[in-house]
Image: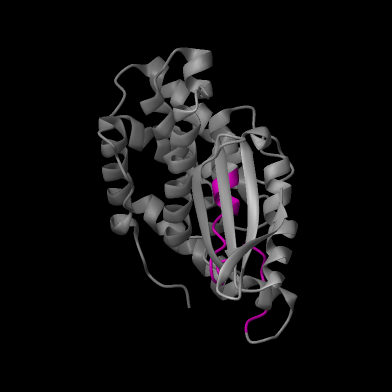
Amino acid sequence: MAKKEVLPKFNIPLENNKKLEKLVSGIKRNKVLNTLLRMSNVNAIDRMGFNDHGPVHVKITANLALRILRILEKNKVVPSIVKNYGMSKEDAEVIVVMGATLHDIGMAVHRQGHEILSTIFALPIIDNLLSPIYKKEEERTIIKYETLQTIYSHEPSRVPLTIEGGVVKVADALDMEKGRARIPYEAGQISIHSISALAIESVQISEGKERPVKISILMSNPAGIFQVDNLLQEKIRTSGIEKMLKIEARIIKDGKEEIIKEY
C-alpha cells in the first residue's frame, strides 16, 4: 500500500531566494496537492505495480532540477524566463521547483496521458501557490504558463521550448537510485528490470569541464545500463538541453570506479 507521506518533509536549498522560500511553504501547506500526490502513489504503486510517483519522487526531482539549473546559470546559461521576459533567476527557480512538484499529479487519475491531466489539475494549485508571492497579474500569468510547459513536456514524446522545461525533464529521469528506476517491473520476479533497478548506486550532478553539467551514474553491475539506455537516454535526447550535459555511466570494479559508457 502506498505510504501516507505528505510534503511537510519537502526540503530544498533556498540560497536566500525569498520567492522560493514562500513557494516551499505554500507547497507544504497545500492539502489538495498533498492529497493528489498520495492518490498518484495509490495508482502507481498499489494498482499498477510502479514505483513511487508521489512525495518522495517530487522532492528528489525538485532538488535535482534546482541543482542542474544553478550549475547552468553559473556557466552563463540564461534561463528562458530571464531571456524572453526579463524576469529573474529567482523566478526560474520557482518555475523548476513548482514544475517538478506538480508534473505527476495527473497520475491521481491515470498513467495514460498523465502529463495532460497534470497541467489541468495544476491550474488552481499554481494560482494558490503564486498569489502570496507575485502581486502583479502579468508576472503570475507568465510564471504560471511557463510552469505548465515544464509539466506538459516532461514525457519523452515532447521537446520543451524552455531551459526550465528541459531541466525538469532531465531531473525527472535521474530519480533512479537503488530500485527507484522509472521502468516498472513485477515485484518478486527476477528480470532485467528488477536487476537493473537495483544496480544504480548513486546519481551525482556536478559542474563539468567539456559541458556545463556532468552527470555521473554509479552502478554496482553493468545491468544498470538497461535503465540508462531505456529511459534516461531518451529523455536527455528530447530535453532541448542535451548539448549542455555530459553523462557518464560508471561501475565499481575491484574497489575502483571505471567509466563503461558515455553519453
Helix, strand or loop for the magenta stretch, by majority: loop
Report which quarter residue 218 is drawn in: bottom right
Magenta-span inclusion, residue 173:
yes
Q: Residue at 72% across / 39% down in the picture?
A: 238
The segment highlighted magenta reads: 170-187
Residue 165 is situated, as x and y percent measured from the top left of the image, at 57, 35
Magenta-span inclusion, residue 83:
no
Determine whether, in the image, residue 217 is placed left or right of residue 191: left
Residue in the foreground of this view, choosing between 74 and 119 = 74
Q: How is the image coloured?
A: one colour
Q: Residue at 64% across / 63% down in the picture?
A: 258
Determine whether, in the image, residue 102 is placed left or right of residue 210: left
Q: Residue at 46% across / 28% down in the picture?
A: 73
Residue 229 is situated, as x and y percent measured from the top left of the image, at 74, 57
Can residue 187 be seen from the camera position used here? yes
Residue in the foreground of this view, choosing between 96 and 149 = 96
Report which quarter residue 170 is drawn in: top right
Residue 40 is situated, as x and y percent measured from the top left of the image, at 51, 61
Q: Residue at 60% across / 73% down in the picture?
A: 220
Determine whether, in the image, residue 137 is placed left or right of residue 237: left
Residue 246 is situated, as x and y percent measured from the top left of the image, at 63, 43
Can residue 48 be seen from the camera position used here? no
Figure label count:
0
Report which quarter residue 119 is drawn in: top right
Compared with 197, 143 (above or below) is above
